[in-house]
Amino acid sequence: VTSVLWFRRDLRLRDNPALHEAAKDGPVVALFVLDHTLLKPAGAPRVAFLYRALRALDAELREHGGELVVRRGDPVNAVPKVVRETGAGAVHVAADFGPYGSQRDARVEDALGDVPLVRTGSPYAIAPGRIRKDDGQPYKVYSPFYRAWLEHGWRAPAATITCRVDWHSGADSVDIPQDPRLPADLDLPEAGEAAARKAWKAYRDKGLLRRYDDDRNRPDLDRTSHMSVYLKYGCIHPRTLLADLGDGDDTYRKELAWRDFYGAILHHFPESAREYYLPEFAKMKYARADTDAFDAWREGRTGFPIVDAGMRQLLGEGWMHNRVRMIVASFLVKDLHIEWQHGARHFMRHLVDGDLASNQHGWQWTAGTGTDAAPFFRVFNPVTQGLKFDPSGDYVRRWVPELRGVSGKAVHQPWDLPDGLPDDYPTRLVDHAEERRVALDRYGRIRS
Ligand code: FAD
């Protein structure tokens, strides 16, 4: 009997447990549904990356005698329609644990009636909800989660397309849309499963994984793996990365565990996608976001070089270095006093790796309102952060052309240059020391 394999954020054929399940029963229809609800909040770079990943998947399916069936609309209608048209007896998916995805799947399950929706695997090394404390409660702190995560362990990846698949072809399909118009000069990484594996191999072959612990905080060196965009759409699964790690790669393993941890936190506390994870912060006083200050932050015109470099990297590349994500997020929340949700929305629009769990909780962590909260009173100083993590100043010069004439680390304090601030670079939007006091005062008030 025919099965539908409904791809969502698992756009690969290798090591795909749901495919393995689907292929057991007979021919497999490969389906993707273009769902407006998910596409709408994504900016052009992420949408383009998705379309390219779909094209790569379709090309690979065609090599194996299949094809990707693409439909448009609400999956609640689109998926049962494909089932009716192909006479399928089951729909196979990798489980989605996001707030929208899990509800959508429940609705699709209802609409399918007697045809089962079979969930196998997830985008995580260990599916959200699996790891719990002895009393059955979820972990809310990362370190004990990490220990339990290691102890639980994960399956080894299957290296090949797990089984012979009899791909079904001939179902109606819309074309994968043309890429939306992208900002000029935007250089997206190559999309798809083969590209993901190639990028991961290159990262290891260059010896960068071994240097990860030393170099990962240095945006000027740009030595992180850039796997986040591939993980976002499941062009590669974290299992594949974990299987290649050795004893010395603890730091990298811990980062993948953060991804699993935030996936689990969002699953247990879906409202944390919007609301303060620590509810007392809802009482805090914040500044409005419909202001010039917010625009200056978004456009990289704050007058703080490391902040501006990061915000321009986001617009120019659809990606930002993790250290700089923390610096710009702290600046929005603790220097401009704007709520993290506004920044998170801007990130979700522009990041190609934009992922609700990692993004919202990365923001809540930096804002001091999330799990493991870096305490609110830890305010990143954009100058000392710049001097420490971009000691050459190369990162700032790469993204802020107005400061390219300034050599070395002086680029982090252009207001102190002997010739004064370059004419075309903005003056500082705020006095950091003063705003830090204001932030601590806001915090003091909700504590008392
Ligand atoms: P590497 O350093 O090579 O790390 C390898 C992988 O580990 C990453 O691909 C990612 O999957 C995982 N990882 C690393 N750091 C984290 C972390 N802090 N939290 C969760 N997973 C992590 N990551 C996203 O994937 N999508 C987001 O939308 C996102 N938004 C963020 C927003 C803020 C404010 C902050 C502080 C962090 C955010 N992160 C997000 C986490 C992190 O910044 C990115 O995963 C990382 O920069 C991606 O680059 P990389 O693949 O080169 O990372």
Image: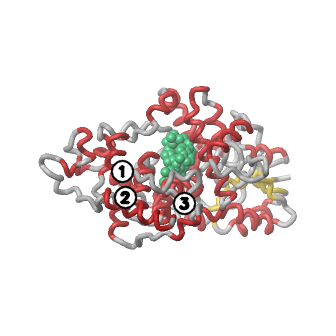
Residue labelled 2 has its Cβ within 8 Å of some atom of ligand 1: no
| Spatial CA span between label 3 and label 2 | 47 Å
Q: Which tag is nearer the camera, tag 3 or tag 1?
A: 1
Q: Secondary structure at mark 3?
A: loop
Lateral position of residue 89 relative to residue 171, left or right = right
Query: Of the residues shown, which amino acid type is indicated by label 2?
Result: Arg
Image marks 3 and 2: residues in contact by CB distance under 8 Å: no
Lateral position of residue 303 relative to residue 136, left or right = left
Disc 3 target residue: 177
Q: Residues within 10 Å of mark 2 (few under 14, many from 20)?
A: many
Q: Which tag is nearer the camera, tag 2 or tag 1?
A: 2
286 w.r.t. 140: above or below: below
Disc 1 target residue: 381
Q: Secondary structure at mark 2?
A: helix
Which comes sooner in the sequence, label 3 or label 1? 3
Residue labelled 1 has its Cβ within 8 Å of some atom of ligand 1: no
Q: Residues within 10 Å of mark 3 (few under 14, many from 20)?
A: some
Q: Residue at x 43, y 55 (%)?
A: 330
200 w.r.t. 377: above or below: above
Occupied quadrant, residue 360: bottom right
Q: Nearer the viewer, residue 23 or 284?
A: 284
Disc 2 target residue: 436
Query: Of the residues shown, which amino acid type is indicated by label 3?
Result: Pro
Q: Residue at x 59, y 39 (%)?
A: 254
Q: Position of residue 351 (x, y in %)?
A: 48, 55
Query: Of the residues shown, which amino acid type is indicated by label 1?
Result: Asn
Which comes sooner in the sequence, label 2 or label 1? 1
Image marks 3 and 1: residues in contact by CB distance under 8 Å: no
Q: Residues within 10 Å of mark 1 (few under 14, many from 20)?
A: some
| Spatial CA span between label 3 and label 1 | 44 Å
